[in-house]
Amino acid sequence: MNELRFTLLSDGSSDRALMPILSWLLAECGVRVAIQEAWAELRGRQPRSSQLAERVKLALQWHPCDLLFVHRDAEKETLEVRKRQILEAISALCLPSTPPAVCVVPVRMQEAWLMFDEPALRTAAGNPNNDTPLELPALASVERLADPKDVLLGLMRRASGFSGRRLRNFRPQPYRIVQLIDDFSPLRQLPAFQALEADLLETINANGWAADAALTPPPSPPPAPDPD
């Protein structure tokens, strides 16, 4: 095997920010071959469907792969419920074969995974030297935020240093944050991320994709102190 191709089917266009995280995780889990990534952008493609099983089918037709990641934010559901919904949709497919699939279920939204690196956030906001205090939420608490996306966009607006018309016209781009991060290991404090890494490692070992056989997940670091 000279390369591993993965496809990400996500909830929306902003969720392509998960791509660098998934590539980093594959390398962390022992994949040493070239990783070819594809984001299944289904907007504007026919036939259109809101059913997850049909969207999975279209993603595989447009982006054949060795490994399929299916993302859904947990939102008001539990991690377990979302994973069950994804796996049931995949099992309902009427295809000759399907690649191994791994569920990607941030709690509550993927934006909760983008608030741990303040320098990257400031740079993504276009003003790395701005010293306005941001007061990032404690990483251990981000899965309890009611609206992580709103919090993240607010932080990027504050980090921009803009005011007035410039602030009103500012359009934060969260995807830029992940492009500026080399190490996502702090996310191992989060149960949802731990579940993703464990499921991915199990899939990698089952398919013999790791350079070192039967890798095990690294020990989870103790959660950071929560000021709340």
Image (cartoon, grey):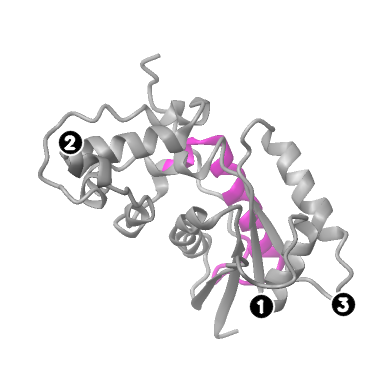
Q: Main secondary structure of the magenta part?
A: helix
Q: Please tell me the numbered disc located at residue 96.
A: 3
- Which residue is painted at 89% across and 69% down in the image? 94
Q: From the viewer's perspective, is residue 30 above or below residue 1?
A: above
Q: Residues within 10 Å of mark 3 (few under 14, many from 20)?
A: few
Name the N-terminal-most of marks 1 and 3.
1
- Residue at image coords 26%, 26%: 135
Q: Is residue 78 left or right of residue 41?
A: right
Which sits earlier in the primary sequence, circle 2 or circle 3? 3
Helix, strand, or loop for circle 2? helix
Callout 3, which amino acid? Pro
Q: Is residue 74 magenta?
A: no
Q: Is residue 148 above or below residue 70?
A: above
Q: Are marks 2 and 3 in contact (CB under 8 Å)?
A: no
Image check: 216 left or right of 24?
right
Residue at (65, 72) in percent of width and height:
45
Does any portion of residue 204 appear in the rendered image?
Answer: yes
Q: Looking at the picture, which amino acid does disc 2 mark? A: Gly
> Which of the two labelled residues, at mark 2 and mark 1, occupies the earlier sequence position?
1
- How crowded is the residue under tag 2: few (<14 C-alpha within 10 Å), some, or many (20+)? few
Tell which residue pokes out farthest to the front in this image. 165
Mark 1, mark 3: which one is toward the viewer? 1
- Magenta stretch: give its range: 187-214
Question: Under tag 1, what secondary structure?
Answer: helix
- Disc 1 marks which residue? 62
Residue at image point 71% right, 61% down:
101
Residue reaching furthest to the bottom: 2
Residue 152 pos. (x, y %): 37, 38
